[in-house]
Image (cartoon, grey):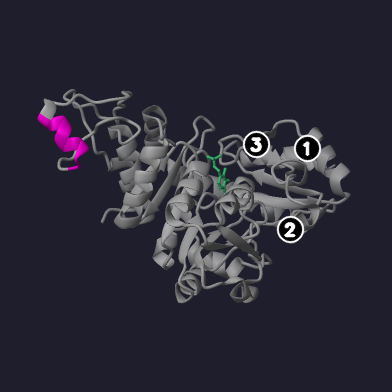
């Protein structure tokens, strides 16, 4: 099998009669049948082919096959957003009466799916601490079907041992579902350690340039078949245009991630002794609690780092307002460096005691380190702190 970079660039499923070198785009809502019999056979699933772009589309399929190859899974199915990938996975695999064990530190909207919607249909959950797996056993019930985790987590950057988590899930009759958004398959491939299903927000590092929304689920053929059926019928399908953008983005994922990680590590090292900061968190800093696990399962530490400014909520918002170049915006994984203040934004809906438990202190700043020159990023942070 060819290397990651080569597959990310060369895996191309469709070429038109024009023999174009770059990947073509198929912006069409439906496809032509040769005759009535062809239409009948496609609807009866006796023949393979495209019917309607909510079901399948060549541009979308190319993105799916690339993602399956990069994650090392048998198949993949794309969705309109990362949340659609997570919701479609849970809604397909769970039934009334089932139970989920999930890390408390999952993405804010994932938390909402579990606590606001799945409970309405009799699907319950128990949250566990990413930083303390010794307590996870107590959360398991006979009805537990899924263990849902993110590593590194958002925004705590807790690192969970994927090999251990997969064993724990399987010993307790659960599937391991991993939101691999922060690491991308370039830094970490959870199936290699035994995970069953990988979800992504392709909106983040996969697009990497802040342009489109997208998501994808990577798993075995069997799981993807049933999740695809759910998507085909309920409608959160990826648009062909976004799929085309994302396929092109994958071509540069490796070089972009290398640079994101270089910049983030450099910043972490430069900032860790800054007098105005209480702490700097980055998985590849030796004093990070998950450092050894990160070294085992990740190629590099990722493009996100967090730090705690002294002085709580007011110091946090004041720091944000003093930034000159770095943007305040609700995204991550962009070429542009982005700062967020989780306590007052993405995680403001969490009750304050839950926030504290997942490490979101009032002064916590999350930085998605971009691809500008590293000195300019550092200088902006230092002048804002000063
Ligand atoms: C952004 C994000 C999501 C949701 O993705 P969307 O594309 O915005 O729907 C899910 N998980 C994590 C970790 C994220 O950062």
Q: How dense is the environment of label 1, judged by Cα within 10 Å: few (below 14), some, or many (20 and up)?
A: many
Q: Which residue is mark 3?
A: 330
Residue matched to label 2: 359
Q: Which residues are magenta?
A: 37-45
Residue 143 appears in the rendering: yes
Where 334 sits versus 112, above or below? above
Identify residue for label 1: 320
Residue 150 showing in the rendered view? no
Of the numbered discs 2 and 3, the one sitting upstream in the chain is 3
What x and y, as percent, mark residue 105?
A: 65, 57
Up the image or down, 8 lies above or below 98; here it is: above
How far apart marks 2 and 3 lie (CA) works out to 19 Å
- The residue at the point 59 percent across, 50 percent down is 120
Using residue 237 as the reference point, say whether residue 125 is left or right of it. right
Disc 3: residue Cβ within 8 A of ligand 1's nearest atom: no
How much space separates mark 1 and mark 3, taking CA atoms?
A: 13 Å
x, y (%) of residue 359? 73, 58
Q: Secondary structure at mark 1?
A: helix
Percent from the top left, x then y, of residue 129? 66, 66
Where, by quadrant of the figure, is residue 19 drawn?
A: top left
For the N terminus, give its image quadrant. bottom left
Report x, y in % for residue 69.
32, 51
Residue 310, labelled with which disc?
A: none
Disc 3 crowd, CA 10 A, few/some/many (<14, 14-19, 20+): few
Mark 2 Cβ and ligand 1 under 8 Å apart: no
């Amino acid at each position: 099998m060819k290397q990651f970079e080569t597959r990310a660039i060369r895996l191309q499923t469709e070429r038109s009669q024009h023999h174009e070198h770059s990947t073509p785009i198929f912006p069409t809502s439906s496809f032509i049948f040769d005759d009535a019999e062809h239409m009948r056979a496609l609807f009866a699933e006796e023949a393979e082919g495209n019917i309607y772009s909510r079901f399948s589309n060549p541009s979308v399929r190319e993105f799916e096959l690339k993602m399956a190859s990069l994650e090392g899974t048998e198949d993949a199915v794309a969705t309109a957003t990362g949340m659609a990938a997570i919701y479609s996975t849970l809604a397909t695999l769970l039934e009334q009466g089932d139970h989920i064990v999930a890390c408390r530190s999952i993405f804010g909207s994932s938390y909402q799916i579990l606590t606001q919607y799945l409970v309405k249909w009799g699907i319950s959950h128990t949250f566990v601490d990413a930083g303390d797996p010794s307590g996870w056993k107590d959360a398991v019930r006979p009805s537990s079907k899924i263990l849902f985790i993110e590593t590194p987590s958002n925004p705590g950057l807790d690192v969970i041992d994927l090999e251990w988590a997969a064993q724990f899930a399987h010993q307790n009759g659960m599937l391991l579902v991993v939101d691999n958004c922060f690491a991308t398959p370039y830094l970490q491939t959870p199936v290699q350690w035994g995970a069953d299903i990988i979800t992504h927000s392709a909106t983040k590092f996969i697009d990497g340039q802040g342009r489109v929304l997208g998501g994808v689920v990577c798993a075995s053929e069997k799981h993807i078949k049933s999740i695809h059926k759910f998507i085909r019928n309920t409608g959160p399908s990826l648009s062909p245009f976004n799929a085309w953008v994302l396929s092109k983005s994958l071509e540069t994922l490796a070089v972009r991630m290398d640079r994101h990680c270089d910049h983030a590590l450099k910043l972490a090292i430069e900032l860790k002794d800054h007098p105005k900061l209480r702490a700097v968190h980055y998985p590849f800093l030796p004093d990070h609690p998950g450092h050894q696990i990160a070294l085992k399962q990740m190629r590099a530490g990722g493009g996100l780092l967090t730090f705690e400014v002294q002085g709580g909520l007011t110091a946090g918002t004041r720091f944000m307002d003093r930034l000159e170049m770095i943007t305040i915006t609700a995204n991550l994984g962009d070429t542009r460096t982005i700062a967020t203040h989780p306590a007052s934004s993405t995680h403001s809906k969490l009750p304050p005691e839950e926030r504290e438990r997942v490490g979101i202190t009032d002064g916590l700043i999350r930085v998605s380190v971009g691809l500008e020159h590293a000195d300019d990023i550092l200088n902006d942070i230092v002048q804002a702190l000063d």
